[in-house]
Each structure stands twice: as structure tokens, then as C-alpha cells.
Amino acid sequence: MLPLTGCDFRQPGGERTASTSSSPTPRLRDPVVDDAVKTLRGLGAEVEFFNDEVVSMRVWPERGESITFRNKDLAIATAFPHLERLALGDTQVTDAGLVSLAKLLRLKSLTLVGAPISDAGLAHVATLQDLESLSLAGTNVSDAGLAHLKDMAQLTLLNLSGTYITNEGLHHLKSLTNLEDLYLGHTDITDRGLVHLNSLIRLKNLDLSGIEITDTGVGQLKALPNLRGLSVENSEISDTTLASLSQMKDLEWLSLINSRGISDEELMHLRRALPRTEISYFWAHD
């Protein structure tokens, strides 16, 4: 199962040998870049290099820690025009700070988990034409913000978990036909909104944890021919759903944790029908 943050630090274009924050800073020709690296590392950022260019930056607090990282600090990263991966976790960066993204046109992966950003900030994100992975989990983004993403057809991963999106907002995703990984857990989506996913024929992994989905909604997912992973944790599905899922022979993993209404008998039938599928299930009774 893919991580729920949707933070993808795989290095595109083959293997790379990178120096991390624990390694000495390489000798750089541009002293502006050298100074920026030193300042950002002092703020807790992890920085990686390739061929003396900064290609990755991560600001992520450890469990129980807090990091102060604001708009002015993100602006320092504009000294890295070759930056491809940027991950910010629980920082204080706001919509106004995202204007700095306009100078980071090579970004392929952007994670803004838990940041106090809203719909207005996504107008800046939409300028990143090479972006392939975007995580907005735990932000204040709503349906209006998704309108800014509708032309980002190059996206392959989108994490909207814990945001304020509803069924109405999902129609903005219909044009994102290259999506392979989509996280919609703990939002206000219901069965009615899932019809908007039918055009996402390349979708491989779908997280619908904690939303008001029933047998009707899950039945619509059979329209996704390449689906390999599905989470419907904490849902109201029943044995009827398991009968439908038993026909999805290409599923590689399936999470049914805390999904009420499932009988032991039908669960055993599902396991027999999908012997190659990793199925996770338990019910934490009240």
C-alpha cells in the first residue's frame, strides 16, 4: 500500500548518487546556492544534491516535534532552479508563500501536508507544468481549489485526504486521465461522487477510507480496468460489496479494516476468490 502522505521521493531518470543532510555540502560554484543550503539546513531542512545541483528538499518534523518554517523560508529555496522534489510537513507556509513556486519550474513532486493553505494557493501550484505528484493532505483545500488542478493532466499521484472536498469537486478531476494513485480518504465524498472517477482508466491505487461509501459506490469501481489497490476502511459496505469485489481478479491489495456489515462467511469466500490479493481486515468493536 502506498503511504498516505503521497510523498514520492523516487528519483526520476534512473539512479542517482545524492548527498543528504548528513553529508558535507559539495563545493558549489554559486555562493548564493551555498548560502541558501546552509540557511535552510539550519531551519531543519534536508537537502539532496545531484551533480552539484540541489534536486530535493524536505522539511518534516519528527514525531512530537514542531518546526518553524514560514513563507520567507520557502522563498530561499528559489535559489535552487533544478529542484525536483519538495516536501513540507506541518509548516506555516500559506497561500501567499506559494508564489515562490513560480521559480521552481522543474518540480516533479510537491508535498504540502498539513500546511495552512487554501484554494487560492492552488493557483500557484497549477503553474508547475512538470509536476507529477501532488499531496495536499490535511490542508484547507475545497471544491473551488480543485478547479485550478483540472488542466494538470500530467499528474500521476494526487493526495486529497483530509481536505474539504465533496462530490461536486470531483468533476474537476475527470480530465486527469494519467492519474495512477488517488487518495480521497476522510473527505465529504459519497457514492454519488464516484461516478466522476470513471474516466480515470489508468488508476491503480485508490484510497476511500473513512468516507460515506456503500455497496452502490464500490460497485462503480468495476469501471476502472487497471485498479490494483483499494482501501475502503471504516465504511458501511456489506456482503453485497464483497461479491462484487470477488470479480476484481487483478486486485493486488484490499483493505477492509473496520468495514461493518461483513460476515465471516463472505470474507472467507472473498479470500478464496482472490488468492493472490493481500486482504487486510479486522473490526475494532466498540
Image (tube, rainbow, N blue to C red):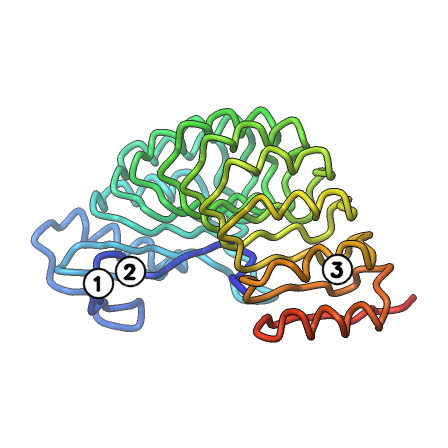
For badge 1, the amino acid type reads Gly
Secondary structure under tag 3 reads: helix
Q: Earlier in the sequence, mark 3 or mark 2?
A: 2
Query: Relative to the observer, which residue lies in front, 192 or 33?
Result: 192
Q: For this view, does 217 lie left or right of residue 79? A: right
For badge 2, the amino acid type reads Gln
Spatial CA distance of label 2 from label 1 is: 7 Å
In contact (CB < 8 Å): disc 2 and disc 1 = yes
Say the numbered circle drawn on residue 242. Answer: 3
User: Of discs 2 and 1, which sits in the foreground?
Assistant: 1
User: Of discs 3 and 2, which sits in the foreground?
Assistant: 3
For badge 3, the amino acid type reads Leu
Spatial CA distance of label 3 from label 1 is: 40 Å
The quadrant the C terminus occupies is bottom right
Q: For this view, does 216 lie left or right of residue 195? A: right
Say above or below: 117 vs 275. Answer: above
For mark 1, what is the residue? 14
Quarter of the image where one finds residue 132: top left
- Which residue is at a point 65% across and 38% down the rendered structure image? 194
For mark 2, what is the residue? 11
